[in-house]
Image (tube, helix red, strand yellow):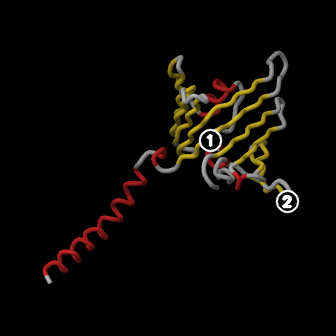
Amino acid sequence: MPARRGNRNARAALLLALPLIGGCAALLPPSTLDTVSGRLSLQVDAQGARPAQRFGAGFDLSGNAERGSLQLSSPLGTTLAQARWSPGSAKLVTPQGERQFADLDALSLEAFGEALPLRALPDWLRGRPWAGAPSRSVADAAAPGFEQLGWTIDLARFDEGWLKASRPGPPAVLLRARLDGAH
């Protein structure tokens, strides 16, 4: 009987500790909670004297619109840039150094030459509209998705790990992502 009472006490202690352990998860930084990885390509059409731009990189995105990080890396795994954000702050770290920005729009303008909706990106890469702005479903059965912030998010191949986001411009911008893992 004493062994049984010990097991019962251990189970009771574990049950009491579970809410505390679960509460700790909310205190952890977003990067430890949910990460989306893969490869992305960005294409920005020429506008005026500025030539067209093309960019491709591996990525690891953690967090959400309020707090998170986005790391871009070369095919060989070298870190090209890392963006980290929290309320009222955005930081861009590159091999050339570290820069502070007021928000993600200013950071993306500096990093990509175009203000990209980086706050919405964590949700878009998870196949859903960002809750911070109105969205509209696309009624095309051949290309399911939604429109948000002037962008069309094409989810036709999302189950295969592909996402395409496009903005007509000017300049026109096309973002493609190949996501690692099943969706």
Q: Position of residue 125 (x, y in %)?
A: 65, 47
For this orientation, the residue located farthest to the bottom is 1
Q: Amino acid at mark 2?
A: Ala
Residue 149 drawn above or below residue 98: below
Image quadrant assignment for residue 149: top right
Crowding near pointer 2: few (<14 within 10 Å), some, many (20+)?
Answer: few
Image quadrant assignment for residue 103: top right
Image quadrant assignment for residue 18: bottom left
Q: Position of residue 145 (x, y in %)?
A: 77, 53
35 with respect to 166 (left or right): left
Q: Amino acid at mark 1?
A: Gly
Quarter occupied by the C terminus: bottom right
Quarter occupied by the N terminus: bottom left
168 with respect to 164 (left or right): right
Q: Position of residue 154 (x, y in %)?
A: 78, 49
Residue 63 drawn above or below residue 88: below
For this orientation, the residue located farthest to the front is 76
Residue 137 drawn above or below residue 119: below
Q: Secondary structure at mark 2?
A: loop
The residue that disc 2 covers is 141
Q: Secondary structure at mark 1?
A: strand
Query: Which residue is pictured at 57% across the width and 26% down the height?
Result: 80
Task: Give 122 or 4, whichever is nearer the viewer.
Answer: 4
Query: Which residue is pictured at 27% across the width and 73% down the height?
Result: 11
Disc 2 vs disc 1: which is toward the camera? 1
The residue that disc 1 covers is 38
Q: Position of residue 52 (x, y in %)?
A: 80, 23
Tag shown at residue 51: none
